[in-house]
Structures are given as structure tokens and as C-alpha cells.
């Protein structure tokens, strides 16, 4: 079993910055990616950014140039540095572990609220 625990959400003004963290624990092995998704009220959950074991990253167009995803060497922790926050970044942010080889299931954190408001 794999557990993901997020931290770092909160309230920030437009143009400000926040940093999210996600720590994975449990039986983690194989090849996988970790990433962040978000869900705003009344909208579907959407991909924000991902990183895999090789350090390859992927971003949603809406956050390119503003958000940066990174991970530790073992990819047991992943971080999301969010700069130049916009009102439309308000959402619950979820950490995800997606198996590519080895593990079988997707794993999700409990979510952390990010609110951007003036």
C-alpha cells in the first residue's frame, strides 16, 4: 500500500507564490511518475504537472512558465512551486502517483486547498 500526504496549501494574493509538497510512503517500486492535479468547484479534475523517474516533466499549458515541479532523487517526494498565482489557480490540489511498470494502481493524496484571492 502507498500513502501520499500533501502539505503547503493556503491563501495567497494574485501574483504571490506557494509551494506544495507531497511525501510518498509505503511499498513503492518500479517505474512511475508523480504529479499534481487540481479540481476547482464545478469542474473536472485536471492535470497540472508531472515528473517521472527520469526527471522528465510535463505541464498544463495554463501553468507553463509559472509553476515548477521537482522531486527528490528517489522520487519519494514531489514539490510544486507556484509563482505568479492567478485567481483561476484556486482549486483543491491532489498529489498523484501513476504506475508505469511495477505497481498496479494509481494513488492519490487527500488534497490540499489553494485559494488565490485579493
Image (tube, helix red, strand yellow):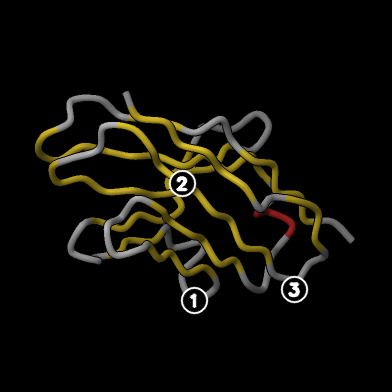
- Residue at the image position 17 percent from the left and 31 percent from the top: 103
Q: CA distance from mark 3 to mark 2?
A: 27 Å
Q: Quadrant of residue 58?
A: bottom left
Q: Residue furthest front?
A: 26
- Residue at the image position 84 percent from the left and 56 percent from the top: 117
Secondary element at tag 1: loop
**Which disc number belongs to residue 23?**
2
Pointer 3 local density, CA inside 10 Å: few below 14, some 14–19, many at least 20? some
Quadrant for the C terminus in the image? bottom right
- Residue at the image position 26 percent from the left and 48 percent from the top: 33
Secondary element at tag 2: strand
Is 11 on the left-hand or right-hand side of 76?
Answer: right
Secondary element at tag 3: loop
Pointer 3 residue: 15
The first of marks 3 and 1 along the sequence is 3
Quadrant for the N terminus in the image? top left
**Which disc number belongs to residue 104?**
none
Q: Quick one: 60 or 82, which is closer to the camera?
A: 82
Is 66 on the left-hand or right-hand side of 58?
Answer: right
Vertical relation: 100 (above or below) 83: above
The first of marks 3 and 2 along the sequence is 3
Q: Position of residue 97 (x, y in %)?
A: 33, 39
Q: Choose mark 2 or mark 1, whichever is in front.
A: 2
Q: Quadrant of residue 59?
A: bottom left
Pointer 2 local density, CA inside 10 Å: few below 14, some 14–19, many at least 20? some
Vertical relation: 17 (above or below) 74: below
The first of marks 2 and 1 along the sequence is 2
Pointer 1 local density, CA inside 10 Å: few below 14, some 14–19, many at least 20? few
**Which disc number belongs to residue 65?**
1
Amino acid at each position: 500500500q502507498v500513502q501520499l500526504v500533501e502539505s503547503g496549501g493556503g491563501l495567497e494574493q494574485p501574483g504571490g507564490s506557494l509551494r506544495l509538497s507531497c511525501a510518498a510512503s509505503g511499498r513503492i517500486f518500479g517505474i512511475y511518475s508523480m504529479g499534481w492535479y487540481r479540481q476547482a468547484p464545478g469542474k473536472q479534475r485536471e492535470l497540472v504537472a508531472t515528473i517521472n523517474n527520469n526527471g522528465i516533466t510535463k505541464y498544463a499549458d495554463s501553468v507553463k512558465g509559472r509553476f515548477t515541479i521537482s522531486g527528490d532523487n528517489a522520487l519519494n517526494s514531489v514539490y510544486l512551486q507556484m509563482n505568479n498565482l492567478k485567481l483561476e489557480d484556486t482549486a483543491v490540489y491532489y498529489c498523484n502517483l501513476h504506475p508505469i511498470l511495477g505497481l498496479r494502481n494509481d494513488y492519490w493524496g487527500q488534497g490540499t486547498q489553494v485559494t488565490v484571492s485579493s
